[in-house]
Image: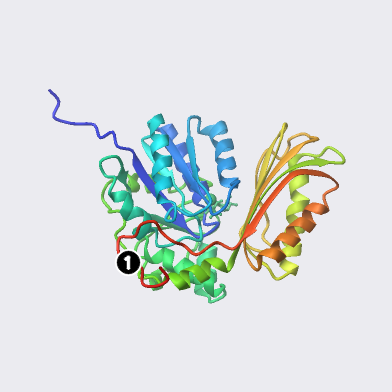
Amino acid sequence: MSLTTVDARPWIIVVGGFLGAGKTTLLLAAARELKRRGVRSAVVMNDQGEALVDSEYASYASAQSIDGLRQGEVTGGCFCCRFSELIGVMEELRAFSPEIIFAEPVGSCTDISATTLHPLREYSDQYRLSPFTVLVDPERAREVLAGDADTNLKFLFEKQLQEADVVCFSKSDRNSVTPSLDVFGAGDVRRLSAKTGDGVAAWLDEMLSGRLSAGSRILDIDYEQYACAEAALVWLNLEAEVRPAVAVSPAALLGPLFDELDTKLSAGGIGIVHLKAIVRAESGFVKAAICANGQEPDVEGNLAASPAANHSLLMNLRALGAAPEVRKIVEECLGRIDGEIDDLRISCFHPAAPRPERRIVGMRSGL
Ligand SMILES: Nc1nc2c(ncn2[C@@H]2O[C@H](COP(=O)(O)OP(=O)(O)OP(=O)(O)O)[C@@H](O)[C@H]2O)c(=O)[nH]1
Ligand SMILES: [Mg+2]
């Protein structure tokens, strides 16, 4: 008779961090690493809107190199406001017996420890919970530390750091020097690059070691201030079918559109926080992203895909500005595409005040 029992409960690994920090890229790199180890994983994406570039990108990644990665989504609100939905989605994913379930909260969200991690701890008969990682883009940290960041963005960034069990710098491949996060009480900060894979296995091992607890830090947060900070952001999610006048490759369609958007948003004084888009055609797909105005787009996918007559465009823009202006600029840029645009669906809004379903202790104000 064996005295050891196999723990069949999947691990939940929640990875937070500001918009564009590299959460999705890390989760997919970690899922790839797990696949190499013969471990099944799943991801749950989350957004205030519908039509997520991250989910579409995860589908491509899984088709290319993480065969078997299962996906779920909680849309139309953050994990804290849709906690029951998160539980329902994870329940559905368990039908595929993942050993690890990654969850990526909305990048403008905070207070996740009190409203998501702690409520999740009540499901300890079904899941094991790993420490809450907050991923930090060193460039964003430098901007906040230098006092160059918008005050609302700074508020969200700081609160996210204050509640992390584990703080980890992303993008180490292009940031050999990282700023000190001591002022945020971040303690020991890890570093990794999801692009090169450096540090990903070590981070994953730490998440699964059981050495650190989940939800060790609970925020003191004013919900009115939190709501104002989130509402300073504009969310634009767009879907469209594009038929250019002359067949072009996905890259040739997306490149000029991205340049135009960057130029027009910058001219309109709109601060781009994360602009990401995917164009897919029969010949292949291309994804592009920038995390600030004037940045060189980070492009992935099949740049050499042949010209195609039909393209599906998916775009998610998170910016600092007013929704009507942002929508107008995006519509103008789309209008400059030489060709036809069908099935255009745009939702553009300021995130509503967060109203968590659960919180371990009462909210200070606003609820
Ligand atoms: N050089 C480099 N770029 C990275 C790395 N990780 C992510 N990126 C890039 O950073 C940008 C943002 O990455 P995402 O993974 O989409 O960031 P996110 O935190 O999921 O963003 P949101 O979901 O919008 O909050 C993309 O252009 C990525 O390709 C990295 O390790 N190195
Ligand atoms: Mg993401």
For image coordinates 49% across by 73% down, the residue present is 145
Query: What amino acid is found at the position of numbered circle 1 in the picture?
Result: Gly
Q: Is the residue marked by circle 1 packed among few (<14), some (14-19), or many (20+) residues within 10 Å?
A: few
Q: Image point 39% across, 30% down: which residue? A: 95
Q: Quadrant of residue 191?
A: bottom left
Count of labels in the image: 1
Q: Residue 238, how many percent across, how many down?
A: 67, 50
Residue in front for this viewpoint, 235 or 151: 235
Disc 1 C-beta below 8 A from ligand 1: no
Where residue 69 sits in the image (x, y, percent)?
48, 34
Reading the image, the residue beneath label 1 is: 362
Taking the image as shown, residue 158 lies to the left or right of residue 247, namely left
Which quadrant would the N terminus be assigned to in this image?
Answer: top left
Can residue 133 be seen here? Answer: yes
Secondary structure, mark 1, is loop
Q: Is residue 175 above or below residue 195?
A: below
Q: Position of residue 359 (x, y in %)?
A: 34, 60
Residue 333 position (above or below residue 204): below
Toward the viewer: 62 or 336?
A: 336
